[in-house]
Image (cartoon, rainbow, N blue to C red):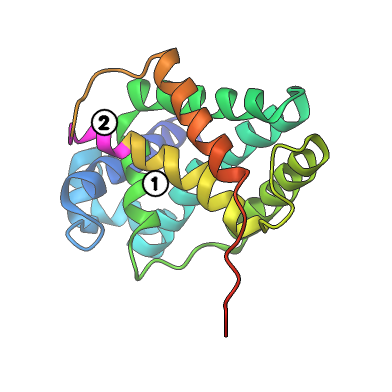
C-alpha cells in the first residue's frame, strides 16, 4: 500500500512535471529539473517511473482522459448537441482559469511530433466521435457526410486553439464569457453542418 506521504509526493512530482514541461518544453524538461521543482531526489522519481517518457505519458492519459470523461458525461446528460458543446467548452474555459498549466500541457504534448498518442486516448476520441456523430445525425445537427475524424477536429481542435490563444494573449487574455462560449458553439455548429469535399480525380 502506498503511504499517504508518498501519495502527496507523487502528486507534487506530477504537478512539477506539468509546470516544468510547460515552461521549458518537452525536450527542454529533464528529470533533474522536475525533481528539483517537486522537492524530491532524482532517485525518488526513478523509483516510480522508468523515466520522463513514462511520467509524461501517464500525465497525458490522466489529463486528457478526464476531459474525455467530462465530454462523455455531457453527451449522456444533455439533450441537444449545442448543450453538449456549451457544457464542454464551459468546462475548458473554467479549466483554463483554474489550471492553466494543465491546458497548456495538453496543447504542448498534442502538438509534439515525437509524442505517440496512447491507445486509450485514441479509443476515447473514437468513442466520442462516434457518439457525437450519432446524436448529431439523428438531430440533423451534423452532416452525414462528416466522419469521426472531422467531428473530433472541429469539437476538440477549435476550442483548444482558442484556449491557447487566450493563455498566450495573442489577441487578448480576457477571461472567457458565456458570449465567447456561445460564439465558439456557433462556429462549431456551422462547421459540423458542412460537407466533405470529394476529390475530382
Looking at this view, is 7 or 184 the one in front? 184
Query: In the rendering, at what x and y percent does residue 64 appear?
Result: 51, 44
Looking at this view, is 55 or 100 the one in front? 100
Left or right, 179 with reference to 153: left
Which type of secondary structure does the marked residue at label 2 adopt? Answer: helix
Is residue 87 shown in magenta? no
Q: Quadrant where the C terminus lies?
A: bottom right
Query: In the rendering, at what x and y percent does residue 16 appear?
Result: 28, 40
* Residue at the image position 40 percent from the left and 21 percent from the top: 180
* Residue at the image position 24 percent from the left and 19 percent from the top: 174
Looking at this view, is 117 or 185 the one in front? 185
Ranked by sequence position, the earlier of labels 2 and 1 is 1
Q: Quadrant of residue 173?
A: top left
Reading the image, the residue beneath label 1 is 106
* 174 to 156, vertically: above or below: above
Reading the image, the residue beneath label 2 is 166
- Disc 2 + disc 1, Cβ < 8 Å: no
* Residue at the image position 45 percent from the left and 25 percent from the top: 183
* 164 to 95, vertically: above or below: below
Q: Quadrant where the N terminus lies?
A: top right
Residue mark closest to the camera, 2 vs 1: 2
Residue 1 shows in the view: no
* Residue at the image position 77 percent from the left and 30 percent from the top: 76
Q: Tell me which segment is drawn in magenta.
A: 164-170
Amino acid at each position: 500500500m502506498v503511504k499517504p506521504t508518498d501519495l502527496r509526493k507523487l502528486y507534487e512530482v506530477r504537478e512539477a512535471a506539468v509546470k516544468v514541461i510547460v515552461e521549458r518544453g518537452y525536450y527542454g524538461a529533464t528529470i533533474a529539473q522536475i525533481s528539483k521543482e517537486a522537492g524530491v531526489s532524482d532517485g525518488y522519481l526513478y523509483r516510480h517511473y522508468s523515466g520522463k517518457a513514462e511520467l509524461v505519458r501517464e500525465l497525458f492519459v490522466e489529463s486528457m482522459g478526464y476531459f474525455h470523461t467530462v465530454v462523455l458525461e455531457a453527451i449522456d446528460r444533455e439533450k441537444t448537441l449545442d448543450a453538449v458543446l456549451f457544457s464542454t467548452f464551459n468546462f475548458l474555459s473554467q479549466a483554463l482559469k483554474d489550471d492553466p498549466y494543465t491546458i497548456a500541457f495538453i496543447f504542448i504534448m498534442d502538438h509534439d511530433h515525437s509524442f505517440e498518442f496512447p491507445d486509450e486516448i485514441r479509443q476515447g476520441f473514437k468513442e466520442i466521435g462516434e457518439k457525437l456523430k450519432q446524436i448529431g445525425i439523428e438531430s440533423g445537427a451534423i452532416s452525414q457526410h462528416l466522419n469521426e475524424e472531422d467531428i473530433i477536429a472541429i469539437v476538440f481542435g477549435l476550442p483548444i486553439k482558442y484556449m491557447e490563444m487566450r493563455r498566450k494573449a495573442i489577441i487578448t487574455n480576457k477571461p472567457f464569457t458565456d458570449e465567447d462560449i456561445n460564439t465558439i458553439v456557433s462556429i462549431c455548429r456551422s462547421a459540423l453542418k458542412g460537407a466533405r469535399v470529394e476529390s475530382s480525380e
